[in-house]
């Protein structure tokens, strides 16, 4: 069961979905290739839609909101799994090579980030922090687009 306000429930569901994907190698990639979602995928989609509809989003905004969250989770899991696979193939030495040959005049911001920044982008611990950051950015956007209840006009007495 999920607890809290709609946005807390939705964020927790995204965390659980990401954790479920991470339990199986290449799961996000496999999920995007599936033409027939199974009962678990349908249940998650139903729950996400129920949360946003109950919060007050329109049918269209509910679909788009949950799609954006689904894309985010799948993209994040795909990136994490691809990075972990690349680490076993020598990602660190490739990053060092990029750093050595990076033209700081042409790419000043990348040069500013440096090797430590590139390594931070591939750190498992930092992946979690970036997931939470991205999730919060999306949730802030959803909160901002949630239709506000219109104040009732006072009834005129006769």
Image (cartoon, rainbow, N blue to C red):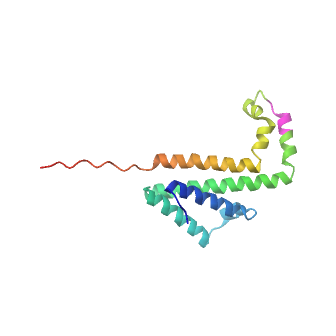
Q: In front: 19, or 27?
A: 19
Q: Is residue 50 left or right of residue 80?
A: left
Outermost residue toward the front in this view: 3
- At x 57% / y 53%, what residue is drawn? 68
Q: Where does residue 144 sit, x and y in percent of width and height? A: 48, 45
Instruction: Say which quarter of the image contains residue 24.
Output: bottom right
Q: 140 above or below 58? A: above
- At x 50% / y 49%, what residue is drawn? 142
Q: Main secondary structure of the magenta part?
A: helix
Q: Is residue 14 left or right of residue 102?
A: left
Q: Where does residue 10 sit, x and y in percent of width and height? A: 55, 57
- At x 49% / y 56%, what residue is drawn? 5
Q: In front: 68, or 16?
A: 16
- Residue 146 covered by magenta stretch: no
Q: In front: 140, or 36?
A: 140
Instruction: Say which quarter of the image contains residue 117.
Output: top right
Q: 24 above or below 68? A: below
- Residue 98 covered by magenta stretch: yes
Q: Where does residue 59 sit, x and y in percent of width and height? A: 44, 59
Q: Quadrant of the N terminus?
A: bottom right
Boundaries of the magenta span? 97-103
Outermost residue toward the bottom in this view: 39
- At x 32% / y 48%, what residue is drawn? 151
């Amino acid at each position: 069961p999920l607890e809290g306000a709609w946005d807390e429930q939705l964020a927790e569901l995204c965390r659980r979905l990401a954790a479920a994907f991470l339990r199986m190698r290449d799961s996000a990639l496999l999920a995007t290739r599936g033409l027939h979602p199974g009962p678990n995928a349908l249940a998650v989609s139903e729950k996400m839609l129920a949360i946003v509809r109950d919060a007050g989003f329109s049918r269209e905004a509910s679909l788009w909101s949950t799609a954006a969250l689904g894309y985010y989770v799948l993209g994040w899991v795909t990136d994490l799994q691809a990075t972990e696979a690349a680490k076993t193939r020598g990602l660190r030495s490739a990053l060092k090579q990029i750093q050595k040959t990076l033209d700081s005049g042409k790419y000043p911001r990348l040069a500013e980030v440096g090797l430590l920044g590139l390594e931070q982008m591939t750190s498992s611990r930092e992946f979690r922090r970036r997931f939470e950051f991205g999730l919060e950015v999306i949730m802030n956007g959803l909160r901002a687009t949630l239709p506000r209840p219109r104040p009732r006009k006072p009834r005129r007495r006769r």
